[in-house]
Image (cartoon, rainbow, N blue to C red):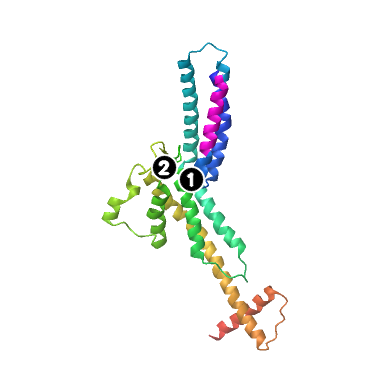
Amino acid sequence: MMAKYEKQITHAIANTVESLLKACERNTWALVRDVFECNTEKAISEFSDAAASFELHSSEIDTKFQHLREFARNLLEMKAREEADAGRVLKRMMDRSKQVLYNYENSMSWYKSETNLDEIERKALSKSLRILSIMAAIRYDEMPDQIENVLYSSLMDRIVLNPSLQKTPMEAVLDPLALDTWEEVSQNSTTLLKPEDCESLWMTFIEEIKPMVTDVKSCQDARKKTRSYAAVAAGVAATGVAAVVAGPAVVVNVGIAVFRRAIMRM
């Protein structure tokens, strides 16, 4: 009889929780709690109705209720630990930064003014850091915690200011990421990634994202050069040099030719 309701809970919770954790949005744990609580209580309610036809003592029914709650909680923790695997979290962080950087890149063109790339890079890193903070612990209740703030101040600010900056002895002693557990979190929270695990993952992420950032910077530099060539071509055309401008591509080609001649004279 219990197997039926365990199967019902598994079917209702497992895939949905997995999808929510893969999405890793700011409200992830609130949505996970809703799925967990609603489907657990639904299974318990249906079991209670079915148990009415059996001669069971109230204590026995309460024990089975507790069993279903523990089964659902263990299922949730199992799925969360699967999704908190370092490789999966790292891939999610990379994908989120890639999305931000490539969305920026795809929105650019040779004639459009550039956005400060440092701001775009910081936005990409922030979104990836949020994934790390979300996957650091299971939030079984609505109590706020400081995990994201701790990670941001310990990792994000330090990386942006100077990636190679070494901690002073005092900073090492006071470093909240040197601890085995998260401070100021609810007693109902369950740690998935220790502070030191998060730091290690972040450093790996920073190294792996460097080529992606370099590519975007190279494209930005290329666009700036294109604009420079176009400006030269426009100046040449304005002084009466023969140039038939049939579109942006022709302007760029004329600019490049003039630029090359200027270089040869140097």
> Is residue 6 visible to the viewer in this orientation of the structure?
no
Q: Position of residue 114 (x, y in %)?
A: 56, 69
- Left or right? Give the position of 147 relative to 12: left
Residue that appears at 56% across and 40% down = 19
- 215, above or below 96, in the image: below
What's drawn in magenta, residue-wise? Answer: 32-48
Identify residue for label 1. 89
Total count of labels: 2
Residue that appears at 55% across and 41% down = 20
Earlier residue among tags 2 and 1: 1
Is 85 covered by the magenta stretch?
A: no
Magenta part, dominant SS: helix
- 116, above or below 61, in the image: below
Q: Residues within 10 Å of mark 2 (few under 14, many from 20)?
A: many
The quarter of the picture where the N terminus appears is top right
Tag 2: residue type? Leu
Identify residue for label 2. 193
Whether tag 2 and tag 1 are in contact, CB under 8 A, the answer is yes
Tag 1: residue type? Val
Q: Residues within 10 Å of mark 1 (few under 14, many from 20)?
A: many
Q: Position of residue 97 (x, y in %)?
A: 52, 54
Q: Position of residue 153 (x, y in %)?
A: 39, 55
Q: Secondary structure at mark 2?
A: loop
